[in-house]
Image (spheres, helix red, strand yellow):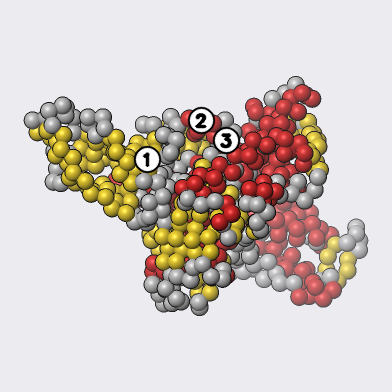
Amino acid sequence: MKTPAVGIDFGSSQLSAAVLQNGRVEVISDDSGAKTIPSIVAFTEDAILAAINPRNTISDIKRLLGRRFNDPCLHEDLKRWPFTITHDSGRPKVEVDFRGARHRFTAEEIAALLLAKIKSVVETYLGVPIKDVVLSVPANFCDSQRQAVLDAASIAGLRVLQLINGPTAAALALQKDLKGPRKLLIFDFGSATLDASVVFVDREHVEVQSTSGTVHLGGQDFDTRIMGHLIDEFRERHKMDLRANPTALTRLRAACEEAKQSLSGSPLTMVELDALFEGIDFRAKLTKAKFEDLCQDLFRSVLDPIQKALYDAKMRAEEIDNVFLVGGASKMPQLLPILRKFFKDKEVLVDSAEFVARGAAIQAAILSGEWKNRPLQVLEVAPWNIALATPTGLDFIIVEKNSQLPCKKQMTFTLGGQCVTNAFKIFEEDKNGNRNLVGVLRVPHKNFTCIADLTLEVDPSGILKVSGQTGTVFTKFAPLNEEEVKKLQTNFDRLDIEEKMQKLRLETKAHLENFVLEVKKGVKDFADKLTQADKDRAVKICDEAEKWLTRTESWEEGFEEQCRVRTFEMEQALAPITAQIHFLRRRGLRRVGRNDHRPCGLQAEQEQPFDYSMRSRQGRGLEEVD
């Protein structure tokens, strides 16, 4: 069976995946039926999982990908994150307490854990291992952020066929339901990013005309405004600052997100948190009017990417045929009147969050050759200008923003007597002049003269590649180099093996815990049928096991073997007592009062005895006492 290529929506707050099967796109669900998993990783003593554990719970990882520690925007985010960010040679790292030690992880490693989780969900759903994927990213992601996503996928054991911008994926999913050629405005407003793209769609093309956006505005920023208001209210009432308590902040942020969602359908909501800080209960009223007042500048700013995208596409709002809203934050009802007014009362449709995953799955099928329907071509655009600065200080825009991808530019520079260095700098820049240094290109340099034959390519994923004549060296300021990625892959594989071993240790621990609980339950249920000596002995042995479990961590060396040995010894020591409990249980007798015993009825007759047996590592069964 050929392994299908999968589309993954790598969202800021949640991940989802879809696959083309039997000519239909199916959104993948996990064992519980959920079609998304949270973009949260929590490190506990027993496992790596999603949970509420403020210091060790990592969220918003997409805002950390591809960033440098001296980035001013990163330091704004640091003010609201409860987890610790340190740096190594200017590269930010997440610091957590994990299994008795302090660990530091790159953003790529955290993102890889999330991608590995969705990979596991997909493989369970399909019943086969997967390798090839198309990943969605915010349209305004820069080169280093896109490269960081590729590195995270590589660490997780995935091969990325292409990165696809979120709005483009949504347009691709919508394309089959539209009649005739249409000009779409896709407004993708997620929890951490905002993108607007003008897209032309017909039966055989999804062609992006222009795109604009920001990675510094999302639904979480509205939650932060509510939080700030409630923190001030708590301070006024109790003269205490909640910012000193990460646990309180985490609980408050969750309550603020819930309040924001409640205000979508109600003019008033209550924020209620018991024992929020130092035992103090907190109750606060939040009205829709107050929420809109707190966030009025954020609501106004959502039009900026739309206006820029329309300007770059040389279009007016009236020329747009359909406006589609995707992403969780786009469901805020306050947005609809703003957008309807801007688009002259044109219908604005709020679409399912699954559209991005569906579109990514269609593109994965196209690239892998699984797409058997009519020919369909997807054309992306460059989200940034690509500029080159020569050693003499001259600047050139080589690739203009919104140029169709892939694109390739070749040029030759000859720099004479005033050339004292051979370094060409490559930048990404927006139309406001904001710049990101992508890398430095060094060309052969002799007698103060540089002759540079350069080729710049931007692939469909938006990744820049630079080459030149023999002797040209391009040093890219990517988050990780190839050697570091390979090292992290090795570490990730080791961590994955350790997690599987930890799962076995936890299963062994659960077996012992269940044995103890079942023995105690039997002693309690049949107290009048057991001798006092047997009861005391059983309770003493069970209490000793519980104390050992309490003071011993499951990740400690030798835990699994000790747990197996202790379980075996308890089974042997308590064999006569468990045999008597089995006998009484099969007879259906249970203690009801001091001297009152009744048959447990049909349920008791059908009840299966607890399986106290346990298999050793070599598979040797321990005989059950009957």
Residue designated by label 2: 75
Q: Earlier in the sequence, mark 1 or mark 2?
A: 2
Q: Earlier in the sequence, mark 3 or mark 2?
A: 2
Q: How many marks?
A: 3
Residues at discs 3 and 2 in contact (Cβ within 8 Å): no
Residue drawn 50% across the image and 77% down it: 23
Q: Is residue 586 above or below residue 565?
A: below
Residue designated by label 3: 81
Whole-angstrom CA distance, mark 3 to mark 2, is 10 Å
Residue drawn 56% across the image and 42% down it: 304
Q: Residues within 10 Å of mark 2 (few under 14, many from 20)?
A: few
Residue drawn 45% across the image and 70% down it: 204
Give residue 39's mark. Answer: none
Residue drawn 84% across the image and 70% down it: 600
Please, what is the three-letter code of the amino acid marked with disc 3? Trp
Please, what is the three-letter code of the amino acid marked with disc 1? Glu
Residue designated by label 1: 428
Residue 394: quarter of image: top left
Residue 326 visible in this rendered orientation of the protein: no
Could you tell me which secondary element the residue under label 1 belongs to? strand
Could you tell me which secondary element the residue under label 3 belongs to? loop
